[in-house]
Amino acid sequence: MGNLRDLLLLLVLGGIVAAWMKLSRARELAVAAARRHCELQGLQLLDETVGLRALRLRRLDGHRRLERGYDFDVSVDGDDREQGRLWMIGQRVSGLSLPTVHWLV
């Protein structure tokens, strides 16, 4: 009985570690996408401020997909601080809101 409990605990811990690694990779992709979009608009991404702020289900091509929302701070001239938001489904950007640009897929 103890071996079954140990195995179950190990599987749960393995699942937690796998989920944490997947979310860490997703955040890295969000940071890269935010930096790329900020550069295209002539904005500065401040302090590596990209952080997961929302999760929601979104229907895409007839299927429900998990969409992650990341908030971050940008600066237009280095003296101000404004908020941006990036939405991602999987590894692609599905929405973006910057002080100068707003678009959704």
Image: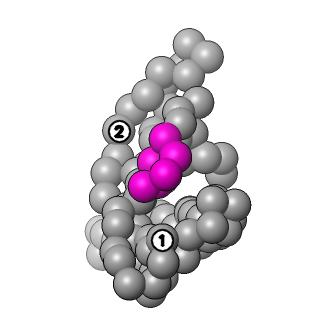
Q: In this image, 86 relative to 31: left or right? A: left
**In which quadrant is the N terminus drawn?**
bottom left
Q: Is residue 45 above or below residue 38?
A: below
Residue under label 1: 76
Q: Residue at x 31, y 59 (%)?
A: 53
Residue density around tag 1, few if under 14, some if 14–19, many if 20 or more, within 10 Å: some
At label 2, which amino acid type do we have? Arg
User: Residue 79: horizontal and vertical position, in percent?
Assistant: 38, 84
The magenta stretch is 97-102
Q: Does the magenta run of residues contain 69?
A: no
Q: Is residue 11 visible?
A: no
User: Residue 78: horizontal and vertical position, in percent?
Assistant: 46, 84
At label 1, which amino acid type do we have? Val
- Front disc: 2 or 1: 1
Q: Nearer the viewer, residue 92 or 80?
A: 80
Would you identify the image quadrant in which residue 25 lies? bottom right
Task: Name the secondary structure under disc 2.
Answer: strand
Q: Residue at x 56, y 13 (%)?
A: 62
The first of marks 2 and 1 along the sequence is 2
Residue under label 2: 56
Q: How far apart are the alpha carbons under marks 2 and 1?
A: 29 Å
Q: Residue at x 53, y 36 (%)?
A: 103
Q: Is residue 29 above or below residue 75?
A: above
